[in-house]
Amino acid sequence: MPAYNEEGSVGAVVREVYDKLPRATCLVVDDGSVDATAAVARAAGAHVASLPFNLGVGGAMRVGFAYARAHGFRAVVQVDADGQHDPGDVRELIALLSDSDLALGARFAGKGTYKVRGPRRWAIALLARILSHTAKAKLTDPTSGFRASGPRAIALFAEHYPAEYLGDTIESLVIACRAGFRVTQLPVSMRERAAGVPSHNPFRSAVYLGRVALAVVFAFARPGIAFREGFE
């Protein structure tokens, strides 16, 4: 669970994880927060890894995958600390790992009422087409951060999880596909953020399409051979 200044929601999310998944291990990666995120998460029962400064979601997730690999976990599920992801969907995501390496919780697959508008909607629709072709599977929500990774993905992402903007969603998916991984999705409902400030607003959405285009270019520009070795 990557968390940056989420003291208002992280405690409730951790408690919900343990309520719905009592056998789970919950690791909160405090991504350089300047509030009480780490203390609140620890008080709720989570294991906490605190980074000295903010690395972004990708950097925090790489820490999580390294932790999972070091402790022998065979499945990792990213659940955001803002309360938008429902831990009740985790079991179904993990079940998909019996036939795939990466399972995405998809917001735009016929379940729930979550909507995006304007440039973000266009960007996600374009990405869905491009990455469905790359993954050889229908993907409707390639920017979803709610996802489950199996053993091969854990090993790969502990070394190669990208930290740049949108790398944690778009580029990580491209890396998985170029490593020959099987990718699938599960329709899920997205909830409203429980606390804090959304990372996007109508003003920032105006530049979202351009950033997505750059992220895709960088993702496909990287040589794929390094990711394929040892995983195909």
Image (cartoon, grey):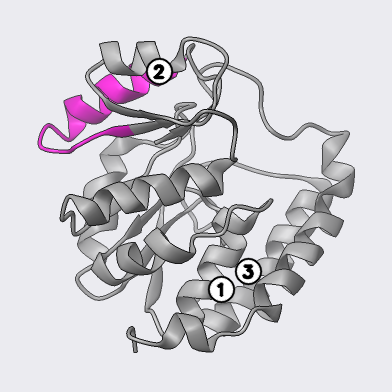
Q: Residue at x 40, y 18 (%)?
A: 38
Residue 214 lies, in percent from the top left, at 80, 64
Measure the C-alpha gap from mark 3 to mark 1: 12 Å
Q: Nearer the viewer, residue 70 or 1?
A: 70
Location of residue 5 by image quarter: top right
Q: Which of the labelled discs sits on residue 33, or is there none?
A: none
Name the N-terminal-most of marks 1 and 2: 2
Measure the C-alpha gap from mark 1 to mark 2: 31 Å
The residue that label 3 is drawn on is: 128
Magenta segment range?
9-27
**Count the marks: how many?**
3
Mark 3 touches mark 1? (CB < 8 Å) = no
| Mark in front: 1 vs 2 | 2
Mark 3 touches mark 2? (CB < 8 Å) = no
| Mark in front: 3 vs 2 | 2
Quadrant containing the N terminus in the rendered view: top left
* Observer able to see residue 83: yes
Residue 9 lies, in percent from the top left, at 45, 17
Decide if residue 124 is on the left or right side of residue 50: right
Seen in the picture, residue 124 relative to 60 is either above or below; the reply is: below
Seen in the picture, residue 59 relative to 179 is either above or below; the reply is: above
Decide if residue 104 is on the left or right side of residue 120: left
The residue that label 2 is drawn on is: 38
Amino acid type assigned to the residue bearing label 3 in the image: Ala
The residue that label 1 is drawn on is: 174
Q: Nearer the viewer, residue 35 or 22?
A: 35
- Residue 13 on the magenta segment: yes
Q: Residue at x 39, y 70 (%)?
A: 184
